[in-house]
Image (tube, rainbow, N blue to C red):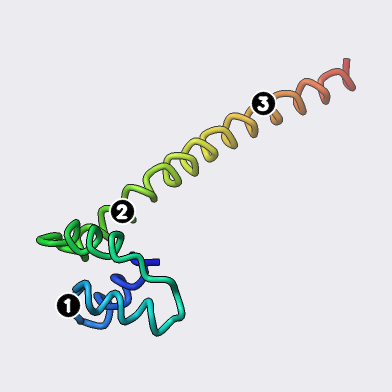
Amino acid sequence: MEVHAALILHENGQKVTEESVKKILSSAGANVDDGKVKALVAALDGVNIDEALKEAVSFAAAPVAAAVEKKEEKSEEEEAKAAESASAGLSSLFG
């Protein structure tokens, strides 16, 4: 939950501080864990959040792109096999 609060603050142009994260969590009715909030704010100190998000998205998208490419290759191979078996079937009709 703490990370979501930090993202909300960041998206709205607010500085991510312990106080602001606690405020969002409290207003949402969530239990505030001071240790987690402090660790999160310390971990984000000096981090370009926009760049970190871009890297996370591109890292997550890479396996998906590879899977789509592999599926396309497999489909082409399957089409070739299907065409081959169809032509073999036709040739048996005409003996």
Q: Which mark is residue 15?
A: 1
Q: Nearer the viewer, mark 1 or mark 2?
A: 1
Q: What residue type is labelled 1?
A: Lys
Picture quadrant where residue 32 is located = bottom left
> Which residue is located at x 29 percent, y 66 percent?
34
Q: Is residue 60 left or right of residue 71?
A: left
**Where is mark 2, residue-wise?**
56
Quadrant location, the N terminus: bottom left
Q: Which mark is residue 35?
A: none
| Residue 88 coordinates in the image, percent (x, y) | 77, 20
How packed mark 3 is, by other alpha carbons closer than 10 Å (few <14, some 14-19, many 20 or more), is few
The CA span between labels 1 and 3 is: 59 Å
Picture quadrant where residue 51 is located = bottom left
Regarding mark 3 in the picture, which secondary structure is present there? helix
Q: What residue type is labelled 3?
A: Lys
Q: Which of marks 1 and 3 is in front?
A: 1
> Which residue is located at x 29 percent, y 70 percent?
6
> Which residue is located at x 54 percent, y 38 percent?
71
**Where is mark 3, residue-wise?**
81
Q: Which of marks 1 and 2 is nearer the N terminus?
A: 1
Q: Do the residues labelled 1 and 2 touch (CB within 8 Å)?
A: no
Q: In this view, does 9 lie to the left or right of 42?
A: right
> Which residue is located at x 49 percent, y 35 percent?
70
The CA span between labels 1 and 2 is: 21 Å
Regarding mark 2 in the picture, which secondary structure is present there? helix
Q: In this view, does 72 lie to the left or right of 42?
A: right
Q: Which residue lies furthest to the top in this view?
A: 95
Q: In this view, does 20 lie above or below 71?
A: below
| Residue 19 coordinates in the image, percent (x, y) | 22, 78
The CA span between labels 2 and 3 is: 39 Å
